[in-house]
Image (cartoon, rainbow, N blue to C red):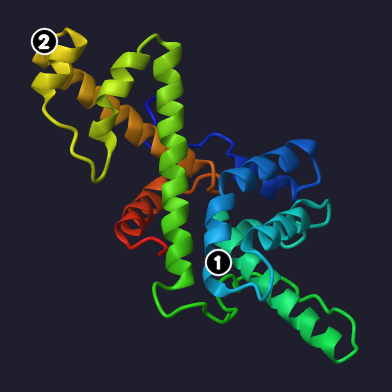
Amino acid sequence: MSPSDGPIFVTTRWTQVLAARGDSETARAALSELCSAYYGPVVAFLTHTGCGDEEPREVAHEFFASLLRRDGLGGAEPARGRFRSYLLGAVKHHIANRCRHAGREKRGGTAEHLPLQSGTDTTVELPLADDSPKPEEIFDHEWAVAVVERALAAVESEAVEAGNGRQYAELKAWLSFDADPGSQAEASARLGVNEGAIKVAVHRLRRRFRESVRSEIAQTLPAGDDPEAEMRHLIEALARQGPA
């Protein structure tokens, strides 16, 4: 069955994490891959919420190191749903804990960790580095960009393995949201095939790209969750303004 024919019921990376609460090597490897894939959105979020005197990338490394510790997934529950929501909530709480720790240190106290409770993934209010766009919108935009980039990389890899790397390089502009791909007649001349073949190739490439995006999204959802709502969210997030 094609990924576009219906819901994906395979075990996803995020499902593996939720099922094992991070205690198995498989679950920890799945979480590590997810964290590596979506490092960029966290850095963008930290950049626009402020990290005091520290660099956002340093704080991001600290956050992910904490998340990947064996006891770092105690709050990961199936009710949390999508990895995107969990990750955003976790980084918000990490920043809140850091600020609380810094405040207590100034008063001579010790750090007190805030528990990450279900349903609180967007309730922590953080200081903004600027007025617009909102850090959550930046996070979602960068999340969508990361999904698209991974989907493109998968499609390119498939094309190269199939011996169609030159064709992909010529036609990939038709997958862009904003670039002008030029005329298909010119592409057909460069590739030495008729224009009808180019139209078919572009159609197939776009379909495979959509499937790849959907598959990438599905890996961040719990089992049985329909990726279509997340696909719509991705499209809306891409349409928003990215980080300045």
Q: Tell me residue 116's x, y (percent).
A: 70, 70
Left or right: 139, with 89 as reference point = left
Element class at badge 2: loop
Residue at 10% in and 15% down:
196
Left or right: 62, with 13 as reference point = right
Q: Tell me residue 115's x, y (percent).
A: 75, 73
Residue 194 - label: 2
4 and 103: which one is in front? 103
Q: Tell me residue 238's x, y (percent).
A: 34, 54
Q: Tell me residue 125's x, y (percent).
A: 57, 82
Residue 107 position by quadrant: bottom right
Q: Which amino acid lies under the numbered mark 2 shown in the image of this protein?
A: Asn
Left or right: 147, with 79 as reference point = left
Residue 47 - label: 1
Quarter that holds the C terminus? bottom left
Total residue callouts: 2
